[in-house]
Image: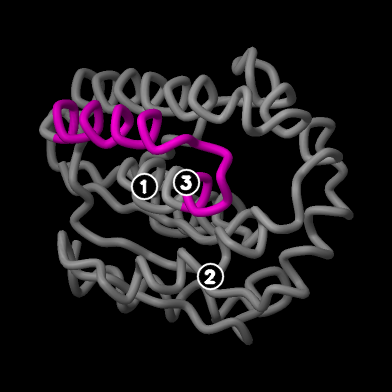
Amino acid sequence: MKFVNVTGAIGAGATTLTKMLATRAGWQLALESDVERRSPFLELYYRDPTRYALHNQLTFLVETIESDESIRTRHRGNETVIRDYCAFEHIEVYAECQRALGMLSPPEFALLRRIGDVIASRFIRPDLLVYRRVPLNIVLERIKERGRPSERYADARLVESVFRRFEDWVQDWTRSPKLIIDSNADFLRDGGAVDRVLDHARKVV
Protein backbone atom coordinates (compact mmCIF):
# COMPACT_ATOMS: atom_id res chain seq x y z
CA MET A 1 0.00 0.00 0.00
CA LYS A 2 1.06 3.55 -0.77
CA PHE A 3 -0.21 6.27 1.55
CA VAL A 4 -0.68 9.94 0.63
CA ASN A 5 -1.59 12.61 3.17
CA VAL A 6 -3.02 15.98 2.16
CA THR A 7 -2.95 18.67 4.80
CA GLY A 8 -2.98 22.40 5.46
CA ALA A 9 -4.22 24.99 7.90
CA ILE A 10 -7.83 25.07 9.07
CA GLY A 11 -9.94 25.99 6.03
CA ALA A 12 -7.13 25.44 3.51
CA GLY A 13 -9.20 23.02 1.42
CA ALA A 14 -7.29 19.80 2.17
CA THR A 15 -10.44 17.68 2.15
CA THR A 16 -11.63 19.12 -1.17
CA LEU A 17 -8.26 18.50 -2.78
CA THR A 18 -8.09 14.99 -1.31
CA LYS A 19 -11.44 14.08 -2.86
CA MET A 20 -10.41 15.50 -6.23
CA LEU A 21 -7.13 13.59 -6.28
CA ALA A 22 -8.84 10.36 -5.24
CA THR A 23 -11.46 10.71 -7.97
CA ARG A 24 -8.98 11.64 -10.70
CA ALA A 25 -6.39 8.97 -9.82
CA GLY A 26 -8.70 6.18 -8.68
CA TRP A 27 -7.09 6.17 -5.24
CA GLN A 28 -8.85 4.87 -2.14
CA LEU A 29 -10.29 7.65 -0.02
CA ALA A 30 -9.85 7.78 3.77
CA LEU A 31 -11.36 10.98 5.12
CA GLU A 32 -11.19 12.31 8.64
CA SER A 33 -14.27 11.23 10.57
CA ASP A 34 -17.14 13.69 11.02
CA VAL A 35 -15.68 15.37 14.07
CA GLU A 36 -18.64 17.71 14.36
CA ARG A 37 -20.78 14.64 15.05
CA ARG A 38 -18.35 12.16 16.60
CA SER A 39 -16.28 14.30 18.95
CA PRO A 40 -17.99 15.15 22.26
CA PHE A 41 -15.34 17.78 22.97
CA LEU A 42 -14.84 19.82 19.78
CA GLU A 43 -17.47 22.49 20.35
CA LEU A 44 -16.70 22.51 24.08
CA TYR A 45 -13.06 23.06 23.20
CA TYR A 46 -13.81 26.04 20.96
CA ARG A 47 -16.03 27.52 23.68
CA ASP A 48 -13.53 26.91 26.50
CA PRO A 49 -10.15 25.90 25.04
CA THR A 50 -8.20 26.02 28.29
CA ARG A 51 -10.54 23.49 29.91
CA TYR A 52 -11.01 21.13 26.95
CA ALA A 53 -7.84 21.32 24.82
CA LEU A 54 -6.40 18.12 26.33
CA HIS A 55 -9.67 16.22 25.91
CA ASN A 56 -9.93 17.38 22.32
CA GLN A 57 -6.38 16.35 21.38
CA LEU A 58 -6.74 12.94 23.01
CA THR A 59 -9.92 12.39 20.98
CA PHE A 60 -8.11 13.20 17.72
CA LEU A 61 -5.25 10.85 18.61
CA VAL A 62 -7.64 7.98 19.34
CA GLU A 63 -9.58 8.65 16.12
CA THR A 64 -6.32 8.60 14.16
CA ILE A 65 -5.14 5.31 15.63
CA GLU A 66 -8.53 3.77 14.81
CA SER A 67 -8.33 5.16 11.28
CA ASP A 68 -4.84 3.77 10.73
CA GLU A 69 -5.82 0.33 12.02
CA SER A 70 -8.83 0.32 9.70
CA ILE A 71 -6.66 1.32 6.72
CA ARG A 72 -4.17 -1.47 7.48
CA THR A 73 -6.97 -4.02 7.68
CA ARG A 74 -8.81 -2.96 4.52
CA HIS A 75 -5.90 -2.13 2.21
CA ARG A 76 -3.28 -4.86 2.07
CA GLY A 77 -2.46 -4.84 -1.64
CA ASN A 78 -0.83 -2.40 -4.03
CA GLU A 79 -3.49 0.27 -3.64
CA THR A 80 -2.84 3.94 -3.01
CA VAL A 81 -4.80 5.39 -0.11
CA ILE A 82 -5.18 9.15 0.31
CA ARG A 83 -6.26 10.90 3.53
CA ASP A 84 -7.07 14.53 4.29
CA TYR A 85 -4.77 14.98 7.28
CA CYS A 86 -1.51 13.71 8.72
CA ALA A 87 -1.36 11.85 12.02
CA PHE A 88 1.67 13.78 13.21
CA GLU A 89 0.03 17.19 12.95
CA HIS A 90 -2.16 16.66 16.03
CA ILE A 91 0.71 17.16 18.46
CA GLU A 92 3.37 18.78 16.30
CA VAL A 93 1.05 21.52 15.00
CA TYR A 94 -2.17 21.82 16.98
CA ALA A 95 -0.97 20.89 20.46
CA GLU A 96 2.15 22.97 19.96
CA CYS A 97 -0.01 26.00 19.20
CA GLN A 98 -2.27 25.31 22.16
CA ARG A 99 0.77 25.14 24.42
CA ALA A 100 2.11 28.42 23.07
CA LEU A 101 -1.25 30.15 23.64
CA GLY A 102 -1.65 28.77 27.16
CA MET A 103 -4.57 26.51 26.24
CA LEU A 104 -2.52 23.48 27.30
CA SER A 105 -0.58 23.66 30.54
CA PRO A 106 3.05 22.48 30.53
CA PRO A 107 2.12 19.18 32.27
CA GLU A 108 -0.75 18.57 29.81
CA PHE A 109 1.49 19.23 26.83
CA ALA A 110 4.21 16.99 28.26
CA LEU A 111 1.64 14.22 28.70
CA LEU A 112 0.49 14.57 25.09
CA ARG A 113 4.09 14.42 23.89
CA ARG A 114 4.68 11.25 25.91
CA ILE A 115 1.52 9.65 24.53
CA GLY A 116 2.51 10.73 21.03
CA ASP A 117 5.95 9.16 21.40
CA VAL A 118 4.39 5.89 22.57
CA ILE A 119 1.82 5.60 19.78
CA ALA A 120 3.84 7.10 16.90
CA SER A 121 4.99 3.66 15.82
CA ARG A 122 1.33 2.73 15.17
CA PHE A 123 0.80 5.63 12.80
CA ILE A 124 1.09 4.89 9.09
CA ARG A 125 3.85 7.10 7.79
CA PRO A 126 2.86 8.73 4.51
CA ASP A 127 4.82 8.00 1.36
CA LEU A 128 4.01 11.55 0.28
CA LEU A 129 2.88 14.64 2.18
CA VAL A 130 0.91 17.16 0.10
CA TYR A 131 0.63 20.58 1.72
CA ARG A 132 -2.04 23.01 0.53
CA ARG A 133 -0.78 26.55 1.06
CA VAL A 134 -3.48 29.23 1.32
CA PRO A 135 -3.10 32.86 2.52
CA LEU A 136 -4.30 33.59 6.05
CA ASN A 137 -7.01 36.03 4.92
CA ILE A 138 -8.51 33.32 2.67
CA VAL A 139 -8.39 30.80 5.52
CA LEU A 140 -10.30 33.20 7.79
CA GLU A 141 -12.89 33.88 5.08
CA ARG A 142 -13.44 30.18 4.42
CA ILE A 143 -13.91 29.37 8.10
CA LYS A 144 -16.55 32.08 8.30
CA GLU A 145 -18.26 31.02 5.06
CA ARG A 146 -18.51 27.30 5.78
CA GLY A 147 -20.28 28.02 9.06
CA ARG A 148 -19.48 24.86 10.98
CA PRO A 149 -21.27 25.01 14.36
CA SER A 150 -18.16 24.36 16.44
CA GLU A 151 -16.04 26.90 14.55
CA ARG A 152 -18.39 29.75 15.42
CA TYR A 153 -16.43 29.97 18.66
CA ALA A 154 -12.95 29.49 17.18
CA ASP A 155 -10.31 31.77 18.67
CA ALA A 156 -8.76 33.86 15.88
CA ARG A 157 -5.42 33.67 17.70
CA LEU A 158 -5.49 29.89 17.40
CA VAL A 159 -6.40 29.96 13.71
CA GLU A 160 -3.49 32.32 12.98
CA SER A 161 -1.11 30.34 15.19
CA VAL A 162 -2.02 27.07 13.45
CA PHE A 163 -1.56 28.73 10.07
CA ARG A 164 1.95 29.92 10.94
CA ARG A 165 2.92 26.69 12.68
CA PHE A 166 1.91 24.63 9.63
CA GLU A 167 4.26 26.70 7.47
CA ASP A 168 7.21 25.98 9.78
CA TRP A 169 6.23 22.33 10.29
CA VAL A 170 6.02 21.49 6.60
CA GLN A 171 9.38 23.13 5.93
CA ASP A 172 10.93 20.88 8.61
CA TRP A 173 9.12 17.72 7.43
CA THR A 174 11.56 14.88 6.69
CA ARG A 175 9.54 11.69 7.20
CA SER A 176 8.72 11.40 3.50
CA PRO A 177 8.87 13.39 0.28
CA LYS A 178 6.61 16.44 0.33
CA LEU A 179 4.77 18.46 -2.28
CA ILE A 180 3.86 22.06 -1.47
CA ILE A 181 0.92 23.35 -3.52
CA ASP A 182 1.11 27.05 -4.26
CA SER A 183 -1.72 29.26 -3.09
CA ASN A 184 -2.56 30.38 -6.63
CA ALA A 185 -3.60 26.86 -7.72
CA ASP A 186 -7.38 26.99 -8.26
CA PHE A 187 -8.59 23.39 -8.19
CA LEU A 188 -12.27 24.26 -8.45
CA ARG A 189 -11.91 26.21 -11.71
CA ASP A 190 -8.80 24.65 -13.23
CA GLY A 191 -8.93 20.89 -13.71
CA GLY A 192 -5.41 21.00 -15.06
CA ALA A 193 -4.19 22.08 -11.62
CA VAL A 194 -5.29 18.71 -10.21
CA ASP A 195 -3.52 16.89 -13.03
CA ARG A 196 -0.31 18.77 -12.35
CA VAL A 197 -0.41 17.73 -8.69
CA LEU A 198 -1.03 14.13 -9.75
CA ASP A 199 1.91 14.23 -12.15
CA HIS A 200 4.20 15.19 -9.28
CA ALA A 201 2.61 12.72 -6.85
CA ARG A 202 2.90 9.77 -9.24
CA LYS A 203 6.65 10.27 -9.43
CA VAL A 204 6.70 9.31 -5.74
CA VAL A 205 3.81 6.85 -5.33
Q: Secondary structure at mark 3?
A: helix
> Label 1 near label 3: C-beta < 8 Å?
no
Q: Any magenta on residue 106?
A: yes
Residue on which disc 2 sits = 164
Nearest to N terminus: mark 3 or mark 1: 1
Nearest to N terminus: mark 1 or mark 2: 1
Q: Any magenta on residue 29?
A: no
> Label 3 near label 2: C-beta < 8 Å?
no
Residue on which disc 3 sits = 99
Q: CA distance from mark 2 to mark 3?
A: 14 Å
Task: Please name whichever residue, 122 or 165, is drawn nearer the observer in this view of the structure.
Answer: 165
Provide residue 181's location: percent of width, then percent of height.
47, 78
Q: CA distance from mark 3 to mark 1?
A: 20 Å
Nearest to N terminus: mark 2 or mark 3: 3
Against 177, is 111 above or below? above
Provide residue 44's location: percent of width, then percent of height.
72, 22
Task: Name the residue at 15% across, 60% down.
Answer: 175
Against 159, is 198 above or below? below
Q: Quadrant of the N terminus?
A: top left
Which span is picked out in magenta? 97-120
